[in-house]
Image: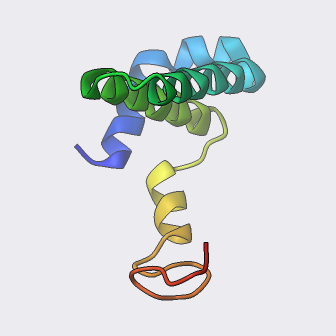
Amino acid sequence: MKIEDAQEMMRKIYFERDRARGVRGTFQRTSEELNELREAILKGKSRTSLEEEIADVFAWLCSLANLLDIDVSEAFYKKYTDTCSKCKQNPCTCPE
């Protein structure tokens, strides 16, 4: 599945609920999911748990992008090319 397919799937399933919740409410839910991922990492949860949390974060980001009328794939590839955005190297050679 491509990024744009995932975003469209989220639009078809959840757009009406997301619109009713609004950008702020959807951003809040996205933040909560990111915190759940943080906790799963810090607690050393299983790979399956981490995959689920990453999927949740991505789904909520897609929902947020839908509300903001932003194409996630286009935004990603506009910012991230095949080199580091700062040092222009691949792999990145920026100092830590």
How many dots with numbers? 0
Q: Position of residue 16 (x, y in %)?
A: 56, 14
Q: Residue furthest front?
A: 43
Front residue (pair 44, 33):
44
Give residue 4's position: percent from left, percent from top. Answer: 37, 46
Q: Quadrant of residue 22?
A: top right
- Residue at the far left: name it: 1
Is 8 positioned to the left or the right of 66 in the image?
A: left
Q: Which quarter of the image is occupied by the N terminus?
A: top left
Q: Residue furthest right?
A: 24
On screen, residue 13 versus residue 33, left or right, reads: left
* Residue in the image at 35% along x and 47% along y: 3
Q: Is residue 41 above or below residue 4?
A: above
Q: Residue at x 67, y 11 (%)?
A: 20
What colour-coding does the image apply?
A: rainbow
Residue at left offset 57%, top offset 78%: 85
Rendered position, 20 above or below 23: above
Q: Residue at 63% of width from left, 32% of height from top?
A: 67
The quadrant in which the C terminus is found is: bottom right
Depth order, front residue of 12/52: 52
Query: Taking 39 as reference, is 4 left or right?
Result: left
Q: Nearer the viewer, residue 96 or 21?
A: 96
- Residue 60 percent coordinates (x, y): 53, 27
Residue 3 against residue 51 in the figure, above or below: below
Q: Is residue 91 above or below residue 48?
A: below
Which quadrant of the figure has residue 45?
top left
